[in-house]
Amino acid sequence: MDVLENLVATVSDFLWTYLLSILLIFTGLFLTIRLKFFQFRFFGHILSQTIGQIFKKNKHKGSITPFQAFTSALASTAGATNIVGVPVAIALGGPGALFWMWIVALIGMATKYAEIALGLKYREKNKEGEWVGGPQYYIKKALGWDKVAFLFAFFLMLEVIPSSMVQSNSIATQVEGAFGWPTWLSGIIITIFIALIVFGGIKRIGKVTDKLVPFMVISYLLAALAVILAHADQLPHVFGLIFTHAFTPISAAGGFAGAGIAQALRWGIARGLYSNEAGVGTAPIAHAAAQTDHPSKQAIWGIVSVFVDTVVICSVSGIAVLVTGAWQDVGVKDASNMITVAFADLFGNNFAGSFIAIFLLFFVLTTLGVLLFYGEKQVEYLFGLKVAKVMRIVYIVSVFVGAIGGLQFVWQFLDLVLAFVVLANIFPLIFLNKEVKEITEDYIERIYKEKHGEPAVRLFSDK
């Protein structure tokens, strides 16, 4: 077993460090250029049509509101990676890792926009009258790559099991450390909560996430900003560290072991990609259920998602550990506790530990609900609705098994299976760049120009 685990770890590390990082960055850059820097040129418009339209009623075709689709997709990315993953990246790559995380996010906006736009264009209704979509649909219907579509759905179906196990275990152990609850008790509570959400389908998931996710994100941001403002005098020095050591090595100091440029690049890129999941292909599954009359109208929510997830949440986490000096006070082995140490600087140890534990609990609960929905949709695509409902039980059981630390050897396959999911999605995105460009140009001509009183031309049929 040890030999197999070492082999899996070696292959996974190679794929994510070299092949996938290069592919995802290339795809993001390629689509950014192909779309003429759409995410930057129209960013003000994008914010006004997304965040600015949250409370506006929508009567277009779809199962859930655009905002519910956005929060559902954001729920699967905003969480442990933003809170504990960023400090780990800084511990291993130095302050410069934060700079490369921003770069990955800025180009990743185009990737997530593209996959959601395609997901909306090729979505369809299932036997229960719900809108379903995702990479497997646009891979099959647009390219005719049936086998690649099958592989995407198959690997994502499998990936949900170890992913849900890791998520539930992370929060069960965190709660055990903060409140002394045994992992089996946390496991039961988490499993019951997740079952109640998942059995309600995407509509219930949307209703839960559109209330919980904004509350969690805003509360966490306010607490982190309070820590940052309490050390506002350190901000010039901190930003100097971020920009300087993105391009130059940094020596050891305190508990920090030092890092070179390659390490800053490697960990900043890896955490950025893992955080916002641009290119993974999961976001289109949630967004496909949204009420909208044009693919780009919903796809621009993907741009906002990457911005909120990485540029906003990850940034405040990283800056908080830098301004407080927690990155130098805490060693690499305990890097995941850096944010707690940073918060304790202002709020005290007891409050900080409880606060982070509670928010990780809520973040993980919403993440798990959406993850299980993603898995169920893959089973539905592969084997039909009846089998999907049976698999729903398997996924729910895996949440409890993961919480108590069972079947840990399965966890070793998480990064490897996820790598196959990305590979099955990223090449179709490149091949379908022309369609994404046409959808985007039609949106600019018909919707953007109409809103700004310019003559519009219909370039794309959304029927």
Image (tube, grey):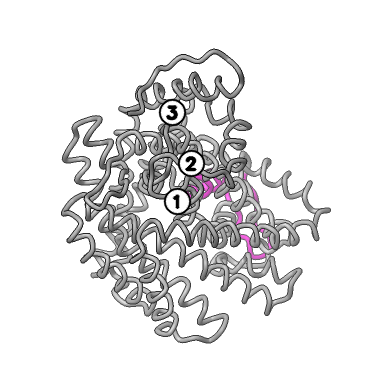
Q: Position of residue 178 (x, y in %)?
A: 57, 80
Whether residues under marks 2 and 1 lie with C-beta atoms below 8 angstroms apart, the answer is yes
Q: Quadrant of residue 436?
A: top left
- Dot 3 amino acid type: Leu
Helix or strand or loop: what does disc 1 sit on?
Answer: helix
Say whether residue 303 is left or right of residue 419: right
Dot placed on the residue nearer the N-terminal end, 2 or 1: 1
Q: Secondary structure at mark 3?
A: helix
Look at label 1 and name its amino acid.
Ala
Q: What kind of residue is marked 2? A: Gly
How dense is the environment of label 2, judged by Cα within 10 Å: few (below 14), some, or many (20 and up)? many
The residue singled out by tag 2 in the image is: 302
Q: Nearer the viewer, residue 276 or 22?
A: 276
Cα gap from disc 2 to disc 1, whole angstroms:
9 Å
Q: Residue at x 64, y 69 (%)?
A: 340
Q: How far is mark 3 from mark 1, CA to CA?
A: 21 Å
Q: Please, is residue 451 above or below residue 319 in the view?
A: above
Tell me which segment is drawn in magenta.
Answer: 249-270
Nearer the observer, 229 or 237? 229
Residue 294 rendering spot, x and y as whole percentages: 42, 32
